[in-house]
């Protein structure tokens, strides 16, 4: 992380701040939150992530403001889903997004997963470009969340180290 920022595990006390990050980034791209389904996890991070063997992390400023988040949610044998990777616009361009992605890839590998999957909206061009640069490959899943029109996967082989 760049100076002035800390990456740490989230707790349920972070839920309101994480919700604001997600709402803010989605609104920036004219996308809506869906707290009834896709975004229900934002009300209980511990149940949706930690109790299922996953993780959810936040980036905070030295002043304590949550400015970014990322989660890994196990989806089945050897598969985890990269979820809720968002970064407020005023903190972009500092390497935080790439550091978050590298952190998630390392966590997934260290936890024994063999594949990371994610769904996204193609309008999130910066995120899509970052995923593709990291080696995520587009694929067609059986189902996708309503606001997502693209899905990617990343195979965690020993040679696919985060860069």
Image: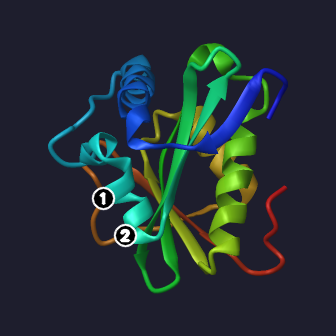
Which residue occupies 27% across, 32% down? 33
Label 2 sits on residue? 141
* 10 Å crowding of disc 1: few (<14), some (14-19), many (20+): some
Side of 161 where 13 appears, left or right? left
Quadrant location of residue 144? Answer: bottom left
The front one of 74 and 33 is: 74
Quadrant that contains the C terminus: bottom right
Quadrant location of residue 113? Answer: bottom right
Q: Is residue 144 above or below residue 110?
A: above
Place of residue 84 in the rendered image (x, y in percent of width and height, measured from the top left): 45, 44
Label 1 sits on residue? 144
Side of 3 where 33 appears, left or right? left
**Colour treatment of the image:** rainbow
Q: Are marks 1 and 2 in contact (CB under 8 Å)?
A: yes
In what element is the residue under mark 2?
Answer: loop
Camera sees residue 36: yes
């Amino acid at each position: 992380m760049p100076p002035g920022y800390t990456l740490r595990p989230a707790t349920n006390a972070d839920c309101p701040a994480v919700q604001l990050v997600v709402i803010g980034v989605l609104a920036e791209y004219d996308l809506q939150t869906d707290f009834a389904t896709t975004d229900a996890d934002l009300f209980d991070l511990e149940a949706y992530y930690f109790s299922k063997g996953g993780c959810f992390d936040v980036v905070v400023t030295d002043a304590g403001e949550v400015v970014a988040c990322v989660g890994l949610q196990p989806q089945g044998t050897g598969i985890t889903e990269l979820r809720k990777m968002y970064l407020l616009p005023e903190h972009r361009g500092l390497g935080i997004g790439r550091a978050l992605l590298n952190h998630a890839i390392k966590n997934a590998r260290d936890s024994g997963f063999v594949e990371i999957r994610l769904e996204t909206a193609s309008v999130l061009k910066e995120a899509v470009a970052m995923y593709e640069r990291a080696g995520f490959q587009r694929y067609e899943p059986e189902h996708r969340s309503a606001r997502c029109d693209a899905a990617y996967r990343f195979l965690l082989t020993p040679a696919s180290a985060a860069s």
